[in-house]
Image (cartoon, rainbow, N blue to C red):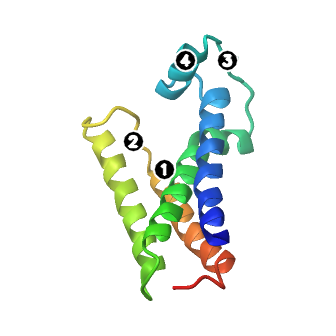
Amino acid sequence: MKDKIKYLLLIIIPLFAGYIIYIFLRGDTIISRFTENLIGIKFAHTAKSGFLLSVIKNWGCDFLWAFSFTSALLYFLRHGNRRFFTASAICIICGTVLELMQKCNILSGTFDVGDIFAEAAAAVIAAITIKGVMKNEKV
């Protein structure tokens, strides 16, 4: 039971953090407009600049969501010696395909190679984190 809670936290917390970044830092996005319409409040989006804030605004959400996705994959791929590699690879492939679909105008959004690197880093870091956090997990 404790392992399920750990997985759940490693999935939900990054999703929520990415959502908060979109609402308060990203401005005019589908997610922020949906939230504003849902609750009837217009959020003040920060216009501040700086290197760290720029990194968080541009790649933080991609990183957090890829971390969450990899964590979810690892929850469902509970058995096997190569599950950490498999989950990371699936996440990296999905992130790359989604970015390429943006490049080809199949999906809305802006193609960014930095997103691919952020998602790849998140997939690897999530696998390493879960491997460390779940040392006593029964597989």
Q: Which amino acid does label 3 sit on?
A: Phe
Q: Residue at x 44, y 82 (%)?
A: 79
Q: Nearer the viewer, mark 3 or mark 2?
A: 3
Give the x, y percent position of residue 120: 49, 63
Q: Residue at x 61, y 79 (%)?
A: 131
Question: Mark 4 or mark 2, which has the lower sequence index?
Answer: 4
Badge 2: how crowded within 10 Å, few (<14), some, or many (20+)? Answer: some
Q: Which amino acid does label 4 sit on?
A: Leu
Q: Which of marks 3 and 4 is in front?
A: 4
Residue 120 seen in the figure: no
The numbered mark at residue 111 is 2
In the picture of the structure, the residue carrying the numbered disc 3 is 43
The numbered mark at residue 35 is none
Residue 32 seen in the figure: yes
- Identify the image quadrant of the N terminus: bottom right
Secondary structure under badge 1?
helix
Question: Mark 3 or mark 2, which has the lower sequence index?
Answer: 3
Give the x, y percent position of residue 17: 66, 43
Quarter of image, res 109: top left
Asked whether disc 2 touches disc 1, contact meaning CB atoms under 8 Å apart, the reply is yes
Give the x, y percent position of residue 119: 50, 57
In the picture of the structure, the residue carrying the numbered disc 1 is 115
In the picture of the structure, the residue carrying the numbered disc 4 is 38
